[in-house]
Structure formats: C-alpha cells, structure tokens
Image (spheres, rainbow, N blue to C red):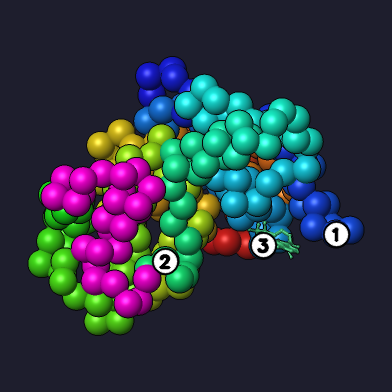
Amino acid sequence: MNGNVAIDVRGLHKSFGETEVLRSVDLTVYSGEVVVIMGPSGSGKTTLIRCMNLLDEPDAGSVTVHGRTLSYPARGSGRSRRRLIRDIRVRTAMVFQHLNLFPHMTVLQNVIEGPISVRRLPRPYAVEMGERLLAHVGLGDKRDEYPARLSGGQRQRVAIARALAMEPEVILLDEPTSALDPELGAEVLQTMRSLAACGMTMVVITHEIPFAREVADRVAFMDAGYILEEQRPSVFFGAPATARARSFLHLMT
Ligand code: ADP
C-alpha cells in the first residue's frame, strides 16, 4: 500500500423501488490493497461494487476514482458527466460470477476487444498485451479456443485477463469462484493471489475465508446496506467487533 487512494466512495445511498439497498456507505481503497467484502446474501455487496463501477448509479453520495469525483444527485452538464462516467468505468474493471465472456469470440479476441474498441490501442500492441496477460493467468496455450471449450475456472481466468487488459485502477470481483467446483475455484483463487502479489488493487466479494485471511488487507463486513465493520482479517476472523459479524462467521464455519 503506498497511501494513494485508488477508489473512494462516500455516503452512498441506493434504492431499488421501495428497497433501500445501500444506506450511507463509505469505503476507501488504497492503491495496492486487497479489500474483501463479506456479508449475508442481500446485504448490498454486489450493489456496492456495481456502484463503484457506476454500472448502477447511486441515488446519493460520491464515487472518486483516480482523483476524479462524480457526485449524486447529478450536477453539471450532461456531456462532462458522461465523459467522467466513462472514465470511471474504464478504470474500474468488473469480473462477474457468470456471463463474463463473448461466446462467439476466441479467448484472445475476448481479451483484446476492450483495449481495441474502448482504449483505441493499435491491434498488434493489444495482441502482444493479450498474449502476455493470458500467459500470466496460465492460459497462453488457449488463445485461439472459444469459451465453450474451456472449464469454468479457465473462463474466469480469461475474464480476469480481460479485466487486466483495460489497465484499470482497480479490479472489482463479484464472487468469482462461487459458481465453480472447489478445484476450479482454487485455480481462480491462485490467479487472484498472484495479482495481489503483483500489487493489483482489488475489491473482492467472496465467502472464501482462507483466501480472505491470507490475501486481504482488510475485510469490510456488510449487513442490511451498511458496512458494519472494517478490520484486518486477523481481527475480523479472530474477534469481530459486532454481534452480527460473529453470528455470520459462526454460520459460515
Ligand atoms: P448481496 O450482493 O449482498 O447479495 P445485492 O446487492 O445483490 O446483495 O442485493 C441487495 C438487495 O437489492 C436485494 O434485496 C436485491 O433483491 C436487491 N436488488 C439488487 N439489484 C436489484 C435490481 N436491479 N432491482 C431490484 N432490486 C435489486
């Protein structure tokens, strides 16, 4: 951690209809940090990271990425806001639980599509970077395969390479292993460990306690739209501050 703020959210509120999903959430993630978000189903974890990437726009609060702040409710001209939204989206790459890859594109095409169409990189440069990233996630030999011919774990690793290809400020991962068998999930966790070791800033929603213990710098525990506590993993898993976290961890283990 070098003290630079990668992403900062302040006072986020988000409702879907009558349901208040985020109720004043603050979270700061520093460059090089791994923050794990845990909490019961429906507590707002996915909505929080979707707001960090502006895939969902908050009703109130602010999102700052790489020093650029967008505040809600909306102010400012439509045009400069749209530019800011686009900028924040490009700098916060998302890896989802499912449906990460374009089925009609090869592995390499999936990885280089964003850099070419969004970042306007020259194709040869994008191909070189794509090959390097695929090698990094252990899939250098799969560049010309189609996603349907890969295992779930391999697909998730391609999705991670695709996220990295945008050279984001932070990667947001939403339960990247929960749809996988433990063995395939382990490959993905290993890839995430190696990214953390390279200093990649990550926000990860996961229920994988051993991974969180080992890799997270901090665990943010959410319940009912609030972050109830933020702790180092040794503290969170050893002696959580809130009764809610204690009962959650009791159910998980
Ligand atoms: P978690 O990731 O902790 O399981 P979510 O952020 O996915 O929680 O969801 C929190 C609550 O918001 C749930 O009650 C869910 O049904 C609701 N919700 C999430 N997305 C939408 C949506 N697009 N429309 C309506 N309700 C939603």
Q: Distance between the residues labelled 2 and 1?
A: 27 Å
Disc 3 residue lies near ligand 1 with CB under 8 A? yes
As shown in the figure, which amino acid type bears the numbered disc 1? Answer: Gly
Disc 1 residue lies near ligand 1 with CB under 8 A? yes
Q: How far apart are marks 1 and 3 (CA)?
A: 19 Å
Can I make out residue 9 in this image?
no
Q: Which residue is drawn at 46% across and 52% down?
A: 94
Q: What stretch is highlighted in magenta?
A: 102-126
Q: Which residue is drawn at 19% across and 75% down?
A: 145
Q: Mark 2 points at which residue?
A: 100
Q: Which of 97 and 87 is in front in this view?
A: 87
Q: Mark 3 points at which residue?
A: 41
Q: Which of 13 and 27 is in front in this view?
A: 13
> For the view shown, which residue lies furthest in the left direction?
141
Q: In which quarter of the image is the N terminus?
A: top left
> For the view shown, which residue lies furthest in the top direction?
3
The disc at residue 96 is none
Q: Give how far across and how far down residue 123 sits, in percent.
A: 19, 51
Residue 121 within the magenta-colored segment of the rendering: yes
Category of crowding for the residue at label 1, using alpha-carbon neighbours closer than 10 angstroms: few (below 14), some (14–19), many (at least 20): few
Q: Which residue is drawn at 55% across and 36% down?
A: 83
Residue 182, compared with residue 192, is above or below; it is: below
Q: In which quarter of the image is the C terminus?
A: bottom right
